Image (spheres, rainbow, N blue to C red):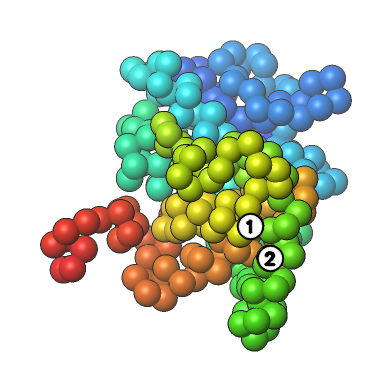
């Protein structure tokens, strides 16, 4: 299921519209990010593990930021699923990427992945591969919200207690692009403490990601302690949507939480 993507990317490369295409490549039995600059290399392109479609996703947008900074005058293509497209839109508003220098090539997620992610929109606005899967509501959020406040607090404290402060959630997040990370600020997070003081580490990150998380779920997948971070951020996103009618990647502009002064009151 890569023929349409390969065809599209080949056209973009041969026409000179893009300098390279950031996608996924399978070599030596492994799948990983790859910058395709030669149309003859597209034979090794894949969209992920066909048997386990959620096992080979990467924060391609985050990698694209570094590439774009090194080659600011060049235009690059990038493989996008629904969450990746939401990420691009949000990164544009934060001036991390120039929309005039990025050409997305979309693929729709299979229903299996859409179900696993409980994704509200498991497809980009335009895609050349795959079929539109049904959107899913967040059963995990409904379940945890159904607990009374005391049980909910106990449940999250138990989850946070497993954290080893590996920073994997931050490092893989395509929306973590700050030059200075609040998770390394001594006044907020005491460095050198393992496990970290709970629940401070994850509450600091949850507040920081409010109005920014695009629900890609990569933090959840990379967590070695299996903390249900995606459920936490989904709930935060629901609160922001209810209070401010804003959801990153779906709504236009920056989060209302990042607008100060009179503009925020209008």
Provide residue 1's location: percent of width, then percent of height: 73, 41
Total marks shown come to 2
Secondary structure state at the residue bearing disc 2: helix
Q: Residue at x 37, y 74 (%)?
A: 243
Q: Quadrant for the C terminus, please.
A: bottom left
Indicate the quadrant where residue 244 lies.
Answer: bottom left
Q: Residue at x 71, y 28 (%)?
A: 32
Q: Residue furthest left?
A: 262
* Mark closer to the chain start, 1 or 2: 2
Image mark for residue 157? 2
Which residue carries the number 1 mark? 198
Provide residue 13's location: percent of width, then percent of height: 51, 20
Q: Residue at x 43, y 34 (%)?
A: 180
Q: Residues within 10 Å of mark 1 (few under 14, many from 20)?
A: some
Indicate the quadrant where residue 69 lies.
Answer: top left
Image side of residue 98 versus residue 233, left or right: left
Q: Residue at x 34, y 33 (%)?
A: 98
Vertical order, 243 against 178 (above or below): below
Provide residue 174's location: percent of width, then percent of height: 53, 41
Q: Do the residues bearing badges 1 and 2 touch, measured as CB atoms within 8 Å?
A: yes
Provide residue 58's location: percent of width, then percent of height: 65, 37
Image side of residue 48 versus residue 264, left or right: right
């Amino acid at each position: 299921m890569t023929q349409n993507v390969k065809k599209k990317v080949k056209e973009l490369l041969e026409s000179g519209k893009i300098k390279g295409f950031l996608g996924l490549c399978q070599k030596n039995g492994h799948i990983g990010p790859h910058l395709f600059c030669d149309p003859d290399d597209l034979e090794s392109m894949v969209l992920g593990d066909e048997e386990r479609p959620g096992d080979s996703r990467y924060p391609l947008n985050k990698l694209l930021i570094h590439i774009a900074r090194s080659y600011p005058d060049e235009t690059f293509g990038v493989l996008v699923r629904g969450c990746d497209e939401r990420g691009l839109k949000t990164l544009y508003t934060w001036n991390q990427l120039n929309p005039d220098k990025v050409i997305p090539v979309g693929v729709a997620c299979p229903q299996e992945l859409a179900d696993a992610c409980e994704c509200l929109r498991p497809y980009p606005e335009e895609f050349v591969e795959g079929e539109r899967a049904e959107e899913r509501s967040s059963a995990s959020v409904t379940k945890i919200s159904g607990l009374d406040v005391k049980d909910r607090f106990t449940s999250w404290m138990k989850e946070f207690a497993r954290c080893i402060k590996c920073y994997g959630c931050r490092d893989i997040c395509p929306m973590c692009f700050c030059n200075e990370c609040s998770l390394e600020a001594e006044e907020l997070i005491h460095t050198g403490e393992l496990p970290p003081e709970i629940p401070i580490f994850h509450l600091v990150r949850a507040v920081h990601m409010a109005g920014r998380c695009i629900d890609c779920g990569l933090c959840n997948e990379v967590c070695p302690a299996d903390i249900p971070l995606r459920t936490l951020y989904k709930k935060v996103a629901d609160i922001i949507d209810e209070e401010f009618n804003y959801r990153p990647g779906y709504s236009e502009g920056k989060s209302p939480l990042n607008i100060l002064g009179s503009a925020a009151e209008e």
